[in-house]
Image (cartoon, rainbow, N blue to C red):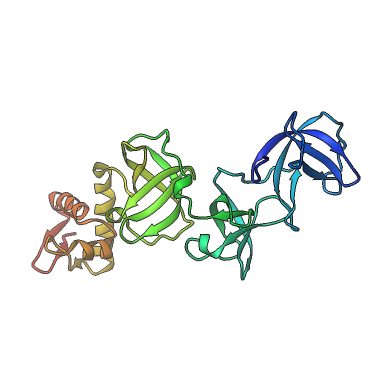
Amino acid sequence: MIEIGKMHKLQVIGKSEMGTYLNFKNARGRDDILLPKNKEPQEFEIGDEIEVFVYKDSEDKTIATLKKPKLTMGELGLLRVVDITKFGAFLDWGLPKDLLLPFREQEGEITKGDLCLVGLYIDDNDKICATMHIYNLLSTESPYKKNDRARGTVYSINKDYGMFVAVDNTYHGLIHNNELYGNYTVGNNIEVRVKKVREDGKLELSLREEAYNEIEGDAQKIMERLNSSGGTLPINDNSSPDYIKAELKISKRAFKRAIGRLLKEGAVKITEEGIERMW
């Protein structure tokens, strides 16, 4: 059986006014696939082997095309939203018939013009559709090691776990909640640091530099806030981690490291109300 959604190398086994009939070499029968003449005007001879993509056309007929789409079954890719309808979003994947991304397969808010990271699946009606639920399509065999830098696409955000990232749009990655600073949405392309490569190959990620590289940046951030607030900030060691994170976008641990650096340099002093700039 010739699977839809994939590229196949098939042999020309017959011709008609409608087009060219294809099947696997030495195979014959009702599974022959039509390469329509009106869509593929090239001429082929019986016995020729050609590479085609097999899918369903706008009339739900299984046909072949010489055009390779931007995405095939088992692959992940960024596709552009070209329309929003009552059925879902339609994506441009390089074929005459746009690819449906059903509402139930979407993550976050989708608008026309967006790029969506998707994979393919076959629905209950034997049609090729797109899905943004790509967790099971990601690889655990990445080339990365601890402290490597990489880029990835945010594909899901879970309030209990954190932000799921497809590193290189290919590999499993997760930024835990305690590593999240700032506002992100599904579809954001971000730079990350690999904190840990787990035994199962999945990557634990961070949006921040290594601790010894963070201090200078965090200290600068605190000084800028002091300057913009008149030289004082109502934040100290007794402030809650959530308050520090909300005010400075850094963890309490990072705050204490940076304050220690600033105290050592004589740039700030600790008061009952918080911290105060010395110069």
Residue 103 image offset from top left, x and y in percent:
54, 65
Of all residues, the one furthest to the right in this rendering is 17
Q: Residue at x 75, y 28 (%)?
A: 26
Q: How many marks?
A: 0
Out of 206 and 117, give the one closest to the viewer.
Answer: 117
Quarter of the image for the C terminus: give it.
Answer: bottom left
Of all residues, the one furthest to the front in this rendering is 29
Out of 207 and 267, give the one closest to the viewer.
Answer: 207
Q: Is residue 231 left or right of residue 163?
A: left
Quarter of the image for the N terminus: give it.
Answer: top right
Residue 260 image offset from top left, x and y in percent:
14, 51
Q: Residue at x 13, y 49 (%)?
A: 264
Q: Is residue 261 left or right of residue 185?
A: left
Quadrant housing residue 171 = top left
Out of 228 and 10, give the one closest to the viewer.
Answer: 10
Q: Is residue 243 left or right of residue 85?
A: left
Q: Is residue 70 placed above or below 160 in the rendered structure?
A: above
Q: Residue at x 41, y 38 (%)?
A: 140
Residue 263 image offset from top left, x and y in percent:
13, 53
Quadrant housing residue 195 = top left
Residue 100 image offset from top left, x and y in percent:
62, 59
Q: Is residue 139 placed above or below 81 in the rendered structure?
A: above
